[in-house]
Amino acid sequence: MQKLPIGEQFFTNLRQKNMIYVDKTQLIHEMMNVGSFVFLSRPRRFGKSLLTTTLKELCRGNRALFQGLFTTGTPSFLIKLLRQKKIAAYDPTRREPNPTLVVG
């Protein structure tokens, strides 16, 4: 029986521990195709951290975590944005107060 992911905010842990996950990768695909800024304004405990860790794994191309989901691995729309340099590269030496993915 699959466990409920109570308090789990990391997509990697959630998938590796076979916890219940509602596939929102199709919504991520739609959000990335909007082509404008997206401001995530949600109450506490509403999945913002899980969304950002899911985006991180998508950008890394971690295909194993996305088996059986709408988006499997690095989707073509993300590769297209990376080639067009519309997504800012992550620089680990630059310290930012919050994780930021720039799509523009």
Image: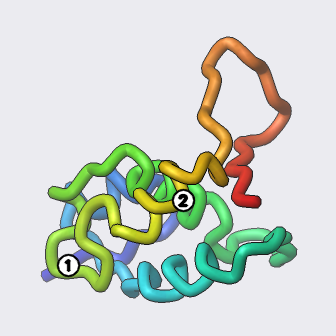
* Amino acid marked by disc 2: Leu
Crowding near the residue tagged with mark 2, few <14, some 14–19, many ≥20 C-alpha atoms within 10 Å: some
* Amino acid marked by disc 1: Gln
Asked if marks 1 and 2 touch (Cβ < 8 Å), the reply is no
For image coordinates 20% across by 57% down, the residue present is: 63
Q: Earlier in the sequence, mark 1 or mark 2?
A: 1
The percent coordinates of residue 49 (x first, y second) are 62, 58
The percent coordinates of residue 39 (x first, y second) are 85, 70
Left or right for 78, reference 72: right
Viewer-closest of 53 and 73: 73
For image coordinates 61% across by 20% down, the residue present is: 92
The percent coordinates of residue 32 (x first, y second) are 60, 73
Viewer-closest of 75 and 50: 75
Left or right for 31, reference 80: right
Viewer-closest of 29 and 19: 29
Residue 81: which disc?
Answer: 2
Which quarter of the image is occupied by the N terminus? bottom left
45, above or below 30, in the image: above
What secondary structure is found at the residue carrying circle 1? loop
What secondary structure is found at the residue carrying circle 2? helix
Residue 62 appears in the figure: yes
For image coordinates 31% across by 76% down, the residue present is: 71
Q: Which residue is mark 1?
A: 2
